[in-house]
Image (tube, grey):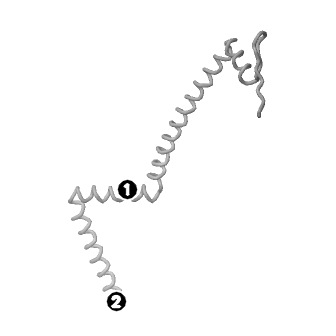
Amino acid sequence: MIFAYHLVWMIRRNFARVGQKISDFVQHPVRVFITCLVFVTAGLLLDGTLFHLWRLNHDSGEIAERISQLRTETMKIDNELRQTRDPNFLELQARDRLELANKGDLVFIFSDK
């Protein structure tokens, strides 16, 4: 019985000490703020949220760059499409790519020797 009484007394004394330390700690707002900041930061880091946000930001930069490249390519293709509607351009392409000649053109044939 004395042992149980002594054990209860030790537990109460330790809780009283812990309570006093917490009370002393809460009296300093800067310490409380820094402690909360540390716990929030640690929670975000351990949860992976900060890394996920950084990765999303990085990916959005890559996507924006890719969109810019695709817009440039689209403008280039649109210009080529406009040129294909011009009869002079079609004739020039037929001559260059298909090696065609117009009536009355002088054609030279060179040997490979």
Find residue 106 and report its horizontal and vertical position in percent: 75, 14
Look at the numbered disc 1 and give the secondary structure of its residue.
helix
What type is the residue that disc 1 sits on?
Thr
Which residue is found at the position 49% from the left and 48% from the top? 55
Task: Indicate which disc residue 3 carries.
Answer: 2
Q: Distance between the residues labelled 1 and 2?
A: 45 Å
Q: What element carries label 2?
A: helix
Task: Classify 23 as above or below 80.
Answer: below
- Please name the amino acid that badge 2 sits on: Phe
The residue at which mark 1 appears reads as 41
Corner quadrant of residue 75: top right
Say which residue appears at 76% left-offset and 23% top-offset. Answer: 98
Residue at 30 percent of width and 73 percent of height: 15
Residue farthest to the front, as pictured: 113
Quadrant of the image containing the N terminus = bottom left
- Mark 1 or mark 2, earlier in chain: 2
